[in-house]
Image: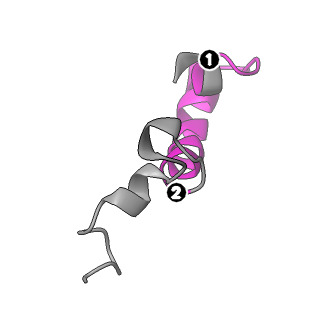
Amino acid sequence: MLEEWAYIRPYRSEAERVAAFPDWLHAYNHHRAATALKGQTPASRVTNLSGQYN
């Protein structure tokens, strides 16, 4: 998390860094494949997310 979000690029302020977090978190959970999950995203493994009532 620190290397992929907090220190991936220079931010002008801590507020700018904090503002970038929601977009990074969404990409991490919904679009980034995890090797520990056999290429699936973390969100794909959670069955009670909004719109995923199976």
| Picture residue at 26% right of the left edge, 68% below the top | 47
Q: Is residue 32 a member of the stretch shown in magenta?
A: no
Q: Amino acid at mark 2?
A: His
Magenta-colored span: 5-30
Q: Quadrant of residue 21?
A: top right
Reply above or below: 28 against 5.
below
Q: Is residue 26 a member of the stretch shown in magenta?
A: yes
Secondary structure under tag 2 reads helix
Q: Where is residue 27 drawn, in percent x and y?
A: 59, 50
Q: Which mark is residue 44?
A: none
Of residues 30 and 45, which is closer to you in this image?
A: 45
Q: Are marks 2 and 1 in contact (CB under 8 Å)?
A: no
| Picture residue at 65% right of the left edge, 16% below the top | 7
Q: Is residue 48 left or right of residue 43?
A: left
Q: Where is residue 17 drawn, in percent x and y?
A: 60, 27
Of residues 32 and 9, which is closer to you in this image?
A: 32
Q: Where is residue 9 drawn, in percent x and y?
A: 76, 21
Q: Which residue is mark 2?
A: 30
Reply above or below: 15 against 35.
above
Of residues 39 and 1, which is closer to you in this image?
A: 39
Crowdedness near tag 1: few (<14), some (14–19) or many (≥20) residues, C-alpha within 10 Å = few
Q: Which residue is mark 1?
A: 3
Q: Amino acid at mark 1?
A: Glu
Q: Quadrant of residue 11?
A: top right
| Picture residue at 41% right of the left edge, 62% below the top | 44
Q: Considering only order in the chain, which callout, 1 or 2, is on the residue closer to the N terminus? A: 1
Secondary structure under tag 1 reads helix
